[in-house]
Structure formats: structure tokens, C-alpha cells
Amino acid sequence: MNSFILRVTIRYLLPLLLLFSVYTFLRGHNEPGGGFAAGLIAAASLSLYTIAYGAKRARQVLSFDPRILIGSGLLLALTSGLIPILLGKPFLTGVWFKIPTPGNASFHLGTPFFFDLGVFFVVAGVTLMFVFIFEEEI
């Protein structure tokens, strides 16, 4: 596609859409959203870039193959399910770790976060792989 308006607009929209994807991911534990929706938003933003500039340039922006996202996402989701087994709990049970921070504070980070991150990577990777394949076929 050769649209000047889309090419100019996507330069400003891409960082904003990726930031919105991060917001949707982090919001997903207590509100609608999470890894699946955030992965689709991230893939949609890069899909718009692909439509504007082509698959070759979009792959350069991504800087690695989408299959790496798929594999690392599956590995991360599996690992988040296996950690509870190592602690004597059922598969995919939420396990929370207390991480100390400076100033006498701490925050809790759990396996559901890493499972959601794995889902994010898999959804974004599969969607981008399809988009790149279809764009290169055309």
C-alpha cells in the first residue's frame, strides 16, 4: 500500500499502541485485558506498520523472528506452571514471591504474571508470523 497519510501516522501511532498494549497487559489482572488482548494490540500495531512499509521493514523494526516470541512464550507459560510443582503444589497454582525494594517496601510478583506474559508472547508471535507470511505472499 502506498499511502502517505498511513506512513506518517504510523510513526506516531506505533509507540502509542505498543504503550497501550503494555497498559492493557498490566491492567489485565484486575480488569478486562491481560496477555491475550495485549498481544493482539501489539500485533495489530506492527501489522499497521507492515501495511504501510512492507514486511521486510517491519521485520527490521521487530529485530527478531516471530517464532522466537512463540517459543519463548510457550517456555515461559510452561515454566510458570511447573514452578508450583517444584514447591509441592498442583500444576498452574499461583505462587507469589515477595521482592524487597529500597525504602523498606516490597512488591509481590507471581507466576500468573509470567503465564500472562507467555500468552502475550505467543499471541503476538503467531499473529505477526501470519501477517508477515501473508504480506510477503502478496
Image (cartoon, grey):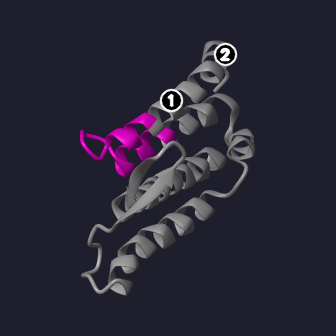
Kind of residue at disc 1: Leu
Between residues 20 and 41, which one lies in front from this camera angle? 20
76 vs 89, left or right, is: right
Where is residue 99 drawn, in percent x and y? 46, 57
Who comes first in sequence, dot 1 or dot 2? 2
* Disc 2 crowd, CA 10 A, few/some/many (<14, 14-19, 20+): few
Kind of residue at disc 2: Val
The CA span between labels 1 and 2 is 15 Å
Q: Does the magenta stretch include residue 41?
A: yes
Is 42 placed above or below 90 here? above
Tell which tag, 1 or 2, sits nearer the viewer.
1
Q: Which disc is residue 17 wearing?
A: 1
Q: Which disc is residue 8 wearing?
A: 2
72 vs 116, left or right, is: right
Q: Which contiguous range is marked in magenta? A: 23-42
Q: Residue at x 50, y 29 (%)?
A: 17
Q: Residue furthest front?
A: 104
Q: Are marks 1 and 2 in contact (CB under 8 Å)?
A: no
Between residues 110 and 136, which one lies in front from this camera angle? 110
Q: Which residue is drawn at 28% across and 79% down?
A: 91
Between residues 132 and 83, which one lies in front from this camera angle? 83
